[in-house]
Image (cartoon, grey):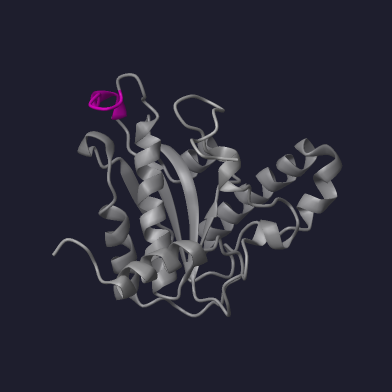
Amino acid sequence: MSRYSDAEIATVYRVIRERRDMRHFRPEPLDPALLQRLLQAAHHAPSVGYMQPWRFIRISDAALREHLHALVEQERQRTAAALGQRQEEFMRLKVEGLRECAEVLVVALMDGRERHVFGRRTLPEMDLASVACAIQNMWLAARAEGIGLGWVSIFDPDALAALLRFPPGARAVAILCIGHVDAFYDKPMLEQENWAQRQPLAALLSENGWGDAPAGAS
């Protein structure tokens, strides 16, 4: 039987709906077996041309974690300065949980990606799309396990590559903060903080051409 039960289907949609980009963590350790399950979930993601371009680096050294935090803080300050009128509002947001979370993973694109042209000859960015799928798999699995995950993208990828001794051509995509949380946010944090609101799906959906309203839409 190819279709899952109604209860199983409902659970999938619930996990998608309740996934959150978490910034507040408790420091207690994560069960190593649980971390392996999350990594396996990521590794089962689809990838264009089956290239599997994701690379994961677990940061277990406390001093190295502090270096990562410093890189993020540097970029946080630069981002704030670039936001103009929203600078103070941005600085009040908590944008990472690097010091509090149980585990830190750096997710990167592999080196030598130019060799993989299947599905990428005209769309080379599909390697990045594949890595994003892997992260989303891990995110949903973490939420199902009751574990928080936060995707940090505020950093200089070249500085991070130098810090972690990346080979030429490899590129950092994300710093993931993973760990136990007291509670998941009722709504996405940036929505709770009135930074932005979710757009209605109807405003983003067209039919047969860009901006053409779907048939039957009022």
| Vertical position of residue 182 compared to residue 172: above or below | below
The answer to which of 146 and 166 lies nearer the viewer is 146
Residue 186 drawn at (x, y percent): 62, 70
149 vs 2, left or right, is: right
Residue at 50% over, 76% down: 180
| Residue 121 shows in this picture | yes
The answer to which of 38 and 106 lies nearer the viewer is 38
The secondary structure making up most of the magenta span is: loop
Count of number-bearing discs: 0
85 vs 169, left or right, is: right
Residue 116 magenta-highlighted: yes
Residue at 61% over, 48% down: 200
The answer to which of 76 and 52 lies nearer the viewer is 52
Q: Which residues are magenta?
A: 113-120
| Residue 60 shows in this picture | no
24 vs 37, left or right, is: right
| Vertical position of residue 210 compared to residue 46: above or below | above
Residue 136 drawn at (x, y percent): 41, 54
Residue that sits furthest to the top in the current view? 122
Residue at 48% over, 48% down: 174
Q: Quadrant of the C terminus?
A: top right
